[in-house]
Structure formats: C-alpha cells, structure tokens
Amino acid sequence: MPTPAPGADAGGGEQVPEAAVRSALRAVLESDGFTASPRLQQFLNYVVEETLAERGDLIKGKTIAIDVYGRDLTDGGGAQNLVRVEARRLRRLLDEYYNEAGRTDAVRIRIDPGGYTPRFLRVGAGNAEPAPEPAGADVSHRDRPGEGAPTQIGEPQIDASRSDPVHGAPTKADTAPPSQPVPAPAASRLPRLGLLAMLLAVAVVAVAAIPLLFRPGQITPSPEAAMRSALREQSVPTLQAANLAAQARGMFFPVFDIRRQELALGMYRHAIDLAPTLPDGYAGAAQTLATLSVMTPDPDRAKALSGEALETAETAVELNPTGAWSQAALAWALGVAGQAGEAEKHARIALDLAPQDGHVLDLVGITAVIINVPELAAEVSAPDRPRSGVGRFGANNIWGTSQLMLEDYPATIEAFTRAPQVGAPVSAPSLIFLAVAQHESGDTKAAADLIGELNETWPDFPAEFLATRIFHANPTVREQIKTTLRTYGGADTAN
C-alpha cells in the first residue's frame, strides 16, 4: 500500500500517496520549461523530497541557498534574496506548466507565496485548485512582514474573478461571440449617456490645456526623473537601491582596478539587499563578478566568480528581460565564461535596446573585445557615436583596443595618446596596448619608454596573464603583447 505524502492534503482530509506525488514531480521535471532550467529542477526536486522525508517544516531560504545554490551565506543576505527571486520563477513556471502541458494532471504541486514548502493537491470534479498568482506578479513582500507589495511597472493585471479557477481560462461571459452583444438594460443607458458627456467635457478641457504645458521656459520632467518618481512610489528602499546602483555603475572604469571593482560589488550587493526585485543590483553585481573573474589568477576561484556572475546576470534578465543593462551584463558574463555566440547575441540585444546608453555601450564593447569581434567593439566605441549617462566611460580605450585588433596602429596610437585629454582612464593595459602599436609601427624608443613607465607605475601588474585572459580568442594580439613586453623588459616577464 503506498505511503501517503506527509501533509499532502488533497482536499476533504484526503492525502495524496507518495507514489502519486513522485509521478507528478517526474512529469513536471521532464516538461520542456523545466528541462530548460536545470537549477529550478533542482530547487523543485529538493523541496519536494524534503517534504516527503517529513522535513518540510525545516525548509527555509537559507537551507535552499546552501543545499541547492551552494552559497555560504557570507554575502550579506544576497544568497537568500536570490532564493526569493528564484522561488518566484519556480512558482511562475509551475503555473505555466499546469496551464498548458499539465492541465490534465491529476496531482499538482503548489508552492504558496510566503514560503518554500510545497503542497500536493489532487485535482478533480468538485476539488478544483484556486487560480494561480498572475505570471510575473511580485509576491516577495509576503516573505517580509510589514512591507507592502512593490508596484510592477508594465505588467498586465489579471482579474482572477473573471477566470476559470483551475486554468485561468476566460469565463463564458469573456468568450461570448462578438456577433451576439448583450444589450444593456434600458435603465442603465441614461447613466452611460451622462458619463459620456462628462468624459467629452474632460477631453475638451485637456486639449485646451495642452499649449499651457509647453510654454517657453516651462520645465518638462526628464525620463530619469519620471523613473525615480515611479521608484519612490514603489518604496523608499527601492529608490535608495536604484540610486546606489547608479553610483556604483559609474565606477566601472578603470576596469582593472581590483579594489575599485570590489567596492562597487559591495554597493551592488547592498542594493540587492534593499530591493531584491530591482534588476539593477543584479546587473551591476554580474558585470563586476565577471570582471573579477578575468583578473583572478586562481583558476578555481575564477571559475566560481564566473559561475556566480552568470547566475546573477540571469536573475537580472529574469526580472527585466527588456532591460539593456541586464542584457549587457549577461553578455559580458557569457563572454568571460567563453560562450562567444550567446555573448554576442545578448550584446546585440542590449545595443538595440539602448543604442546611446554609454554604460551599455561600454559593456557591449568589452564583450566584443573578449569574444574577438573587433568590428562590434569599434561600432559601439566610435568617437563620433552619441552616448548618454553619468560617470567615466571607457569608449576611448575600447576604440583604441578595437583598432589594435584591426591592426590600424596609427588609430590605436591616436586613441591612447589622447586618453588624458578626453578624460579616459589611463591604466596599465592602455600603456601596454600603446606600446604594442608603437612597436608594430617601428617606433622602438616610444615603445621602450612606455614599458619603462609601466614598470615604474604598475610594477606588479600581471600583464602577460591578463593578455592571455583578455585575448584568449585572438592569438595574434596576445603574442604581440608578449613580444613587446619581452623585448623591452616588462616587469611581468623579467624572470
């Protein structure tokens, strides 16, 4: 006789047998949506197995963070915030499965908002499951007593009272053929006529007021101001998180300053703590983790940072699929991980979404460098390309690097020589790339002076190591850098 699943109430006091629960779990895990999301497969399998083992009351965000995501809980709460976001993805994926492929399943798995312990329900006549939360709805506030529900901008609102209680399908009233309109009762038509008259009057007043809104000297709110007003309406912590992420975003260059990157990472993680549903913190953390991965000589540590960058970037895109920053951060994380094709795809998506955002253009540019697509790097960093945003941009240096990759050495020399005049970062890589261009152009004295300056200013800079990391897909430039360093006595090659 099958053992009932503990606490698996199917309605009316009946319990669902363990074998039926496992069959339901197997059907979900083998569905298309879940096979494309291995981490969510692990999440669901973990909470179901723990519940079947009578440990459902012990399932917490921190246990999932440790057992499923391999976190050590030393990142200031970021791991548990990630679990909350992933739980929302899991609930939505379950809803999609039961609305489509699993609509006829006899047993369903539900994870209610506010917790992680699943319920198992037998669905049948007279025992229908309540309508699921609307896809994309933010319910994370239920995990945090005292907080209100953040407003979701641009998400469609679903009237559950007009949906089928099991599958969310429209009711008969919603699906009545348009050729059979139901006439309004005569008594209700007069109020409607009055309402139409009132709306017409309001429209006339609005049209008359339009010229007053655009008088000379009138200040029109910027899109950024409107966005911050919307965030303020959502919650004060959300606005604080957005401001913090924006400040850290301007610190991305110089890229190869490890302490600067670590400081920015702390700011992004604090932004995630303040507003776990805001994508900005995740996008920023992802771009910084990927950058630290490039600069880390320990291969195991570099791999761990790269993996965390990918996870965090995917969360940013999940929270805001049309966010250019999220897409650009994912592109950079993919490029660092060696997934060139996917990296270029997301880089071009980001470029299409925000063709003038200076920070997005920079992320696309460095992604193009590391995946060896110099034409794209040149496109987004061209000196005459319009760009918007606040902070220091790396466009000049990306342009110079792209020209080095394209073997246009005069353009490379011009770009890195003018860097101080245009406020571009002057760093160890920029000296190295300029020295390479001078060497390839035959100016050995200029090349020697630049390597001398490198040795004096950044004597411990791991030049050859980073050349291998940045240009792993471009052996020509990689060897040019090594040759120049060895020819003129670069400190990194002294021994």
Image: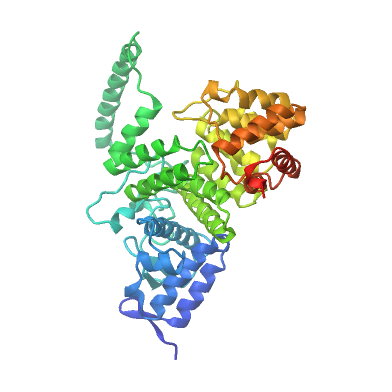
Which sits in the foreground, 362 or 422?
Answer: 422
Q: What is the x, y in percent for residue 302?
A: 56, 56
Q: What is the x, y in percent for residue 91?
A: 42, 60
**From this viewpoint, which residue is outermost toward the bottom?**
1
Residue 329 located left or right of residue 484: left
Location of residue 410 with respect to 166 vertically, above or below: above
**From this viewpoint, which residue is outermost toward the top?**
216
Q: What is the x, y in percent for residue 83?
A: 40, 60
Location of residue 209 with respect to 119 vertically, above or below: above
Residue 316 located left or right of residue 141: right
Q: Looking at the image, which residue is at 54% across and 49% down?
A: 290
Q: What is the x, y in percent for residue 1?
A: 44, 91
Which sits in the foreground, 3 or 418?
Answer: 418
Is residue 158 visible from the viewing direction of this image?
Answer: no
Location of residue 364 with respect to 305 vertically, above or below: above
Which sits in the foreground, 443 or 465?
Answer: 443
